[in-house]
Amino acid sequence: MFFYLLLLFTLLPMTELILLIKIGRHIGLLNAILIVIATGISGASLARWQGLAVIREVQNQLSVGIMPKEEILDGIMILSGGLLLLTPGLITDFIGLVAIIPVTRKWIKYLVKKKLKRMIDEERFQINRF
């Protein structure tokens, strides 16, 4: 786990910087910076809008006595996507937008559930109940 975190906090920023430099050479530094700012602002607005929609859905389900399941995962993904959008860079902006947009979020949820189910079936992941 430590190795993956080390890679995340060293390789990702380095890759983001290299990408911004290469794009800046082609379209200009100011344009590259403006793209990062624009994706951050638009993504944050989308995250806020989607987050409020999920909160409303959770409240609706709780008001009729239903425990929200999908919406909790949606909320986690929207929060994660929003945090990625606040991180400067094009790769993190892309991943953040993918986590926030409902269509792609649904696809990611499917893949995450499939992976977790396989891990539980192979007994590599255990759920302890109190």
Image: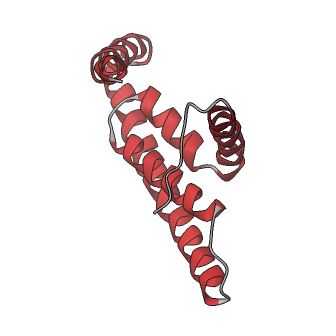
User: Coloring scheme of the render?
Assistant: secondary structure
Q: Is residue 110 left or right of residue 53?
A: right
| Residue at image coords 52%, 71% | 52
Q: Which of 88/27 is in front?
A: 88
Q: Is residue 55 above or below residue 16?
A: below
Q: Which of 5/87 is in front?
A: 5
Q: Position of residue 86 (x, y in %)?
A: 34, 44
Picture mark count: 0
Image quarter of residue 44: bottom left
Which quadrant does the C terminus fall into?
bottom left
| Residue at image coords 58%, 68% | 54
Q: Is residue 46 above or below residue 29?
A: below
Q: Position of residue 110 (x, y in %)?
A: 72, 42
| Residue at image coords 38%, 26% | 32
Q: Is residue 98 left or right of residue 13?
A: right
Q: Is residue 23 left or right of residue 73?
A: left
Which quadrant does the N terminus fall into?
top left
Q: Position of residue 18 (x, y in %)?
A: 34, 11
Q: Position of residue 41 (x, y in %)?
A: 41, 50
Q: Which of 74/28 is in front?
A: 74
Q: Is residue 88 left or right of residue 75?
A: left
